[in-house]
Amino acid sequence: MSSARNMIALKSILHKETHRFMRIWVQTLVPPAITISLYFVIFGSLIGSRIGKMGGFDYMAFIVPGLIMMSVITNSYSNVASSFFSAKWQRNVEEMLVAPVPNWVIVAGYVGGGMARGILVGLIVTIIAMFFTDIQIYNIWVIILTVALTSATFSLGGLINAVYAGSFDDISIIPTFVLTPLTYLGGVFYSISLLPEFWQGVSQLNPIVYMVNAFRYGFLGISDVSLTLAFSVLGAFIVTLYAIAMYLITKGIGLRS
Amino acid sequence: MSKALDITGLKKTYKGGFQALKGIDLSVNQGDFFALLGPNGAGKSTTIGIITSLVNKSEGQVKVFGYDIDSDLETAKSHIGLVPQEFNFNQFESLTKILVNQAGYYGVERATAHQRAEKYLKQLDLWDKRDNAARMLSGGMKRRLMIARALMHEPQILILDEPTAGVDIELRRSMWEFLRELNKQGITIILTTHYLEEAEMLCRNIAIIDSGVIVENTDMKSLLAKLDMETFVLDLKAGSPAPQIQGFCSRVIDDHTLEVDVRKSQRINDVFQQLSEQNIDVQSMRNKSNRLEELFVSLVGSGEQEGEK
């Protein structure tokens, strides 16, 4: 298949994926907006006003980047996990499997759809945050790069989850038992420099720490970890997860008998 | 004549050890209307699954218009349109979106895809439903949607796995007409079906598969010529005396129904002559069953006996 034809196939998958989450916007875009608004009200305004400064900033300003990143992570992951599993369950994934669509186009199409939802929800949350605090931007390129790489990472994770999933329960296990704890312990609500030395070391094993801190650096110019290390971790995750996703789709695990 | 499909030594063993295909050879000429028949579990859908890359083969070679699925899979796929047995579209999408997206997977530009979607939705009497979610369609409409979807990239070979299952007779006949028209336009058609009448009505060549083995592969006329005997059901005028037919195997079903087995070497005229001599009037006559069905049962039945040995 020529590259022009591959691009049409990629656009078709992207169109299908973005249309899917836009069609069910009440399920996909509204809930994160409500959840994050509650975080802003409770943790930011009510409790945050009693906490004082964190990293030299008001608590509300400190948690905004982490909460945006939390929305991006959750929505990128769940978009691809539920969409790809649904395509498996309804068997309409076969529409792509019988067509001359290269496997990398299938992976890129679904990841692109996950990124689109993650970034759109991130934008919605950012707009909501503007009602609670003044958003400042320290380095826009770091923000854009971090959000793009993070949403790609978790979209790939959602795809791998969906490939292995045998039921709808299976696509909620990882978000519930892995993603949520890692996100809450990933420095969204606190600076890891507040932790005892041992737990600081443990926190550095948590990849979400690097994503949240790189993102916070883009807004506030502060980070608990080096930016180079943060982007290296993100890059390593993307390369590894992409290789796993490609292997699974090429082998047809859970897709071909 | 060039081959639309050429299969040699195709084997498939599923995890768990079930051998669905035991080394089948099959070829279909370009422009053919070909039937692949077999009972449930015979290997029809596995064969189609391998051709369309939904099932990984264990051994053997499959070529589609000369393109080997091992070395030229994408080119081979671009020649095939598949109408699967199960509904496998997104039930929540509109008909137009399903068709246009499918065309996109084959590299068809969106503007062209919209034109083709309109053409096929109109031809298959689905145009009024174009903006409806697919789940709102009836079973017959869903089948037609899958045919439209398979045609969106204008394939050279159309494979239909039980396309008229659960479709009422009127709709089935209109689908037959549609398929005949496609075949006239040069599209090679491969059909699996349980309706043997369908194969007899539509197809020029036929393969019968049973327990993963091709038990017959020939043209329809030759196959039907192998049928040695037909059973006729005669409706006799009420009050007729009990008939005595010499030289034929016959059965009196009730006081006005007679079944007679007529071999190819025999003449049905002789039956009428004997009945006439006995002053028995025949009001009507019909075949007891589809001829192909009788042959099918005999072929598949012998396969089962071999399998049990």
Image (cartoon, coloured by chain):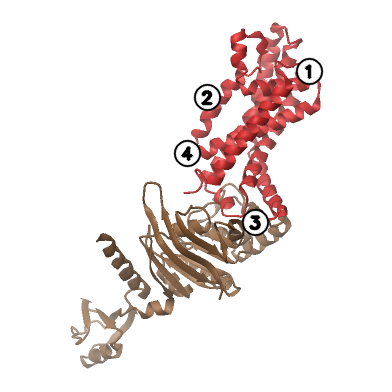
Q: Chain of mark 4?
A: A
Residue holding disc 2 = A177
Q: CA distance from mark 1 to mark 2?
A: 31 Å
Q: Chain of mark 3?
A: B
Q: Are marks 3 and 4 on the same chain?
A: no
Q: Position of residue B168 (x, y in %)?
A: 46, 64
Question: Tag 2's secondary structure?
Answer: helix
Q: Are marks 1 and 4 on the same chain?
A: yes
- Label 1 vs 4, first from the N-terminus: 4
Question: Tag 4's secondary structure?
Answer: loop
Q: CA distance from mark 3 to mark 4?
A: 29 Å
Taking A14 as reference, is B26 left or right? left
Q: Chain of mark 2?
A: A
Colour displayed for chain A in the image of the structure: red
Residue that appears at 56% across and 54% down:
A98
Residue that appears at 62% across and 42% down:
A107
Residue holding disc 4 = A166
Residue that appears at 63% across and 41% down:
A110
| Tag of residue B271 | none
| Tag of residue B106 | 3
Give the class, few, some or many, for how many residues have Cα within 10 Å of label 1's Cα (few <14, many ≥20).
some
Between B76 and B134, the one nearer to me in the picture: B76
Question: Mark 2 belongs to which amino acid?
Answer: Phe
Question: Mark 4 belongs to which amino acid?
Answer: Gly
Answer above or below: position of A5 versus B197: above
Q: Are marks 3 and 2 on the same chain?
A: no
Question: Tag 1's secondary structure?
Answer: loop
Residue holding disc 1 = A221
Residue that appears at 56% across and 44% down:
A249
Between A176 and A197, the one nearer to me in the picture: A197
Q: CA distance from mark 2 to mark 4?
A: 17 Å
